[in-house]
Image: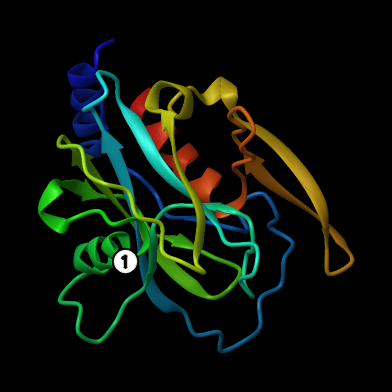
Amino acid sequence: MNANGEITSLLAALQTQGRPSSDFDLNPDVELPEGRKLRNAAVLIPVTTYSGRAEVILTKRASSLKHHPGQIAFPGGKQDETDTNLAQTALRESWEEIGLPPENAKILGELEPHETVTAFTVTPILAHIETPFTIVPEPGEVDEVFSVPLSHLMDTRQYAVEYRLWRGAKRKYYTVPYGPYYIWGATARMLRALADRVAQ
């Protein structure tokens, strides 16, 4: 399938019924504190086609960060009061984190929200990036910006469920490794949700 065909498949997937996901999908025994308040956040899933094939831009968070150091993530962050909507949040954060001009991103649609263990409701915003731009990683926040073929991320056979100990208990999570990059946790879960919709 060529790049345009892959974008068409994403648009078709957006017409199907999705469902919210969470860091607890694979761990239904997790007990969350009463009165837990969730904060709104958004991430951009930037799909580029200017290389001749559809690819997804991802970042590697700086190893010096307090939260999730060195992990693979989409550009994004919490919603500010000045953001008119979650798409604007994702675009603003993408400009800050990787230098993506907002006018370069054509919003295709929103995916179902994802609840994180850090008490965020994260809305993934799917965008098509047709025009090349100069990637500028945000100093102190982003160590690396790289791309993964969309075909790899939309192939459910590439996903595995692994586990690690968290607060004394075994906790499962999705992974979708690519080369030297270990994509896991919330990022892998949101990608798996999209892959499931594409596969419908």
In terms of depth relative to the viewer, which is nearer, 140 or 119? 140
Q: Residue furthest right?
A: 168
Residue 111 x/y as whole percent:
31, 50
Residue on which disc 1 sits:
96
Kindly tell me whether residue 200 is visible in this rendering: no
User: Percent from the top left, x then y, of residue 188?
Assistant: 54, 44
Q: Which residue corresponds to the image point at 37% horizontal and 62% vertical from the top-left?
A: 97
Between 86 and 68, the residue placed more toward the observer is 68
Please name whichever residue, 128 or 142, is drawn nearer the observer in this view of the structure: 142
Question: For the point 15% across and 76% down, which residue is it?
Answer: 84
Q: Secondary structure at mark 1?
A: helix
Q: Amino acid at mark 1?
A: Glu
Q: Is residue 30 visible?
A: yes
Q: Quadrant of residue 4?
A: top left
Q: Quadrant of the N terminus?
A: top left
User: Looking at the image, how many numbered discs can be counted on the residues?
Assistant: 1
Which percent across, then down, holds residue 174? Answer: 63, 42
Q: Is residue 88 left or right of residue 22?
A: left
Q: Residues within 10 Å of mark 1 (few under 14, many from 20)?
A: some
Occupied quadrant, residue 57? top left
Q: Residue furthest left?
A: 103
Residue 142 shown left or right of residue 111 in the figure: right
Figure quadrant of residue 148: top left
Give the residue drawn at x 42%, y 55%.
Answer: 20
Q: Is residue 30 above or below residue 162?
A: below
**What is the basis of the colouring in this image?**
rainbow
**Relative to 174, is 5 above or below?**
above
Give percent across and percent down for residue 12. 20, 29
Q: Is residue 3 left or right of residue 27?
A: left
Residue at 43 percent across and 52 percent down: it is 74
